[in-house]
Amino acid sequence: MDVWSGSFTLIIAFIVLWLRMAIHYLGQYILLKIMNAPVIGVTLMWYKIKIDYSFWYVGQEVAVVAFGTLANTLIFLLFVLICHISQKYIYCFPVSFCKFIAWYGLATVFDFFLIAVIDFATQDWKGDLFKLYLYYG
């Protein structure tokens, strides 16, 4: 393995981790808009996107927390479907995109854990990890 190959894999991994985070919060934002929940503000940071919104009932909070991870899962399934269709009908798929899909799958599996680590590290007590706790607290 040459140096470029290892560096390329690390670059893909960092891009995928950021993309996973962006899709997580974009999915939550889209769900909030579908539910007609008033979104007060969106703050972009390199490690997190903070969405301030008003909520009315616990079902909305559960849906918002679950839909971030579900959005990543749906995007991952779309990538897998594209790869499968490409392999079946075109008989080829670029190796770099296969690496991207593999990293995205790994990031999707650990999505909630990565969100929890960021919430703990930044001491964001209103983050996804603590939303339901604060609702009942």
Image (cartoon, rainbow, N blue to C red):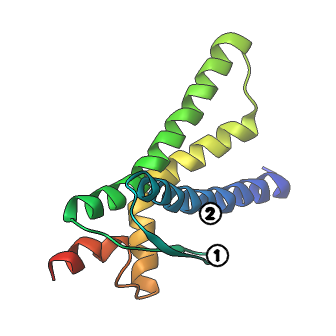
Q: Secondary structure at mark 1?
A: loop
Say whether disc 2 or disc 1 marks the residue closer to the N-terminus: 2
Quarter residue 115 falls in: bottom left
- In-front residue for pair 68/114: 68
Q: Amino acid at mark 2?
A: Trp
Q: Residues within 10 Å of mark 2 (few under 14, many from 20)?
A: some
- In-front residue for pair 114/5: 114
- In-front residue for pair 58/99: 58
Q: Which mark is residue 27?
A: none
| 54 vs 93: above or below | below
Q: Check disc 2 and report the residue beneath it.
A: 18
Q: Secondary structure at mark 2?
A: helix
Q: Which mark is residue 46?
A: 1
Look at the image and tell me in which quarter the C terminus lies: bottom left
Q: Amino acid at mark 1?
A: Trp
Name the outermost residue toward the top.
Answer: 89
Residue 77: where, in percent of width, then height?
50, 35
Q: Is residue 62 left or right of residue 102?
A: left
* Callout 2–callout 1 Cβ contact below 8 Å: yes
Q: Is residue 97 left or right of residue 136?
A: right
Q: Residue at x 62, y 78 (%)?
A: 45
Inter-mark Cα distance, 2 to 1: 8 Å
Q: Residue at x 66, y 43 (%)?
A: 99
